Image: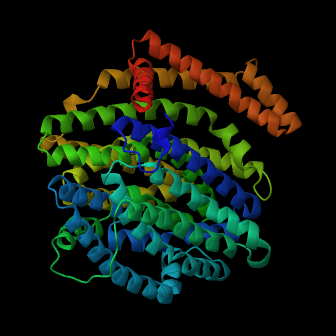
Amino acid sequence: MLGILRPSHAHSAFSATVVLMVATFLSRIVGLVRVKYIVWLFGRGMQADAFNAAFVLPDMISYFLVGGAASITFVTILTRYRETGREAQGHRSLSVILTTMYLVLGAALALAEVFAPWYIHWWFSGFDAAKAALCVRLTRILLPAQLAFFAGGVFAAVLLVRKQFNVQAVAPLIYGLGTIVGGVLLVRRLGVESLAIGTVAGAFAGPFFLNWLFARRAGTRYRPILDWRDEGLREWVRLSLPLIAGVSLVTADNWIIAHFASRIGGAVSLMSYAKQLFTAPMAVLAQAAGAASLPFFASLWSQQKRYEFATGVADAVSRVASLGLLAASGMVALGAPAIDLVFTGGRFSPGDARLCAAYFSIFSISLFLWSAQAIYSRAFYAAGNTMTPMLAGTIVTVLSLPAYSMLFRWQGAMGLAVASDLGIALQTVTIAVLLHRRRMVSLASLDYAEMARCLAAAAAAGAAVWLALTWPHGLLARVAGARMALSSRAMDLAVLGAGTLLWAVVALLVLLKSGSALPRVALRRLRFAAASEAE
């Protein structure tokens, strides 16, 4: 059983999903500690806004130069080399691509260092001079981390093709800890800049170094090679160009929100905190399942197993969407006590927590859509088609921009959260329809009955928790009243714990009574995985 934890262990699709879900959950716990540390030190003040906004330019450069998906495109390429017995040629192509992109990305980052002031004043037009200047300094510190992320993504693909997921599970933990360690060691001397330095150090120590180390142990050797005629380089450019030329709302959503929110003091930070708390369960469901499934989808497609590919994608979408519906109800119902427990304190007031909780609840409604689109997009990537989803994503993003602008003018930052939900709904439906029309994954093959059962369980469990918290004579309402009187962290935890237990019991009862297969299948798969790994 302990063999599953070895870095070189080759996983099944299910065990990989479980490992990545557990690891992603742990990394998000570290991420919440990281956010809590930032919140405690800087709240939603000028320094917090500048720090959260400083990530936008580095993310844009990474996205538009390398497609923001180095490991995704490399998994497809290296899988094809491995399936056809040309693994050595794949390793040479890896060296060629890394060398080429080091030069290209390095030059772009150098230009970004120079032109950062002009960019910040344009994109964050609501920032005053002091906030903009601080944001420029922080942006310049964060920019080099993109080299680590790109190279780490390439080396990660080597491990993913071998079905080795444990390093991918650990690397984000180290990255998250980097910000905290940087702050603890340097915050008194450098202020908020210490967080940026720690973030860069974490990027090099986790996503880059760990992946490089274990890819090397797997036999990969990087050599500086420039060869414009290399087959792998041309294939990577072909797959990446659509990702570079287009933009997906999945990524652009954060950029757009930050752009409009900069016009309201503290809104960039509050929206960022709410989104980071929301992405914790979203990453566990969508990113972990998507990362685990991609190598298996790519392998099925390369072996011409079209039926198995289609049913595998449909089953994965049905599962993550069902779980997303369940999780969203608990997040909406328990968002306020959760944020009060996690964030309130230091320079973050109870009023800040209430506003942040409202944003979080609106974001949470779309959890099942974020989960489903992550699987659907990887179905296209596994088939070697990056043009279609990125062209669709670009069109969806352009069509969504007026909604962000209109809802922001109407409802301020709250309108941005609503626009985010509407945009991701359009993105998910568009990708699903395109897969259906190309006869890759049929919409009819989704398990609508199971999703309906999970929706009923989610509605019942969420309503039960909401009534328990708001009904004057409810148990949780009394506990909440005591919490307000005592202002105790223990009482915050009691409300959250009791609410979570009530939600889980009601959801499980409705699932069992409605005949849902989800509890039974989950238990059976866990037993099967444990038995398989024990052998």
Taking the image as shown, residue 343 lies to the left or right of residue 162, namely right
For the point 32% across and 35% down, the residue is 316
Query: Relative to the observer, which residue lies in front, 310 or 429?
Result: 310
Q: Is residue 271 visible?
A: yes
Taking the image as shown, residue 48 lies to the left or right of residue 64, namely right
Query: Relative to the observer, which residue lies in front, 198 or 463?
Result: 198
Residue extending farthest to the top is 513
Taking the image as shown, residue 520 lies to the left or right of residue 162, namely right
Q: Is residue 359 visible?
A: no
- The x and y percentages for residue 423 are 38, 51
Q: Is residue 33 above or below residue 53?
A: above
Q: Is residue 341 above or below residue 406?
A: above
- The x and y percentages for residue 468 are 68, 22
- The x and y percentages for residue 144 are 50, 78
Which part of the image, by quadrant, shows the C terminus? top left
For the point 19% across and 82% down, the residue is 228
Numbered-mark total: 0
Query: Relative to the observer, which residue lies in front, 393 or 362?
Result: 393
- The x and y percentages for residue 114 are 49, 90
Question: Residue 220: which quarter of the image?
Answer: bottom left
Residue extending farthest to the right is 486
Question: Residue 250: which quarter of the image?
Answer: bottom left
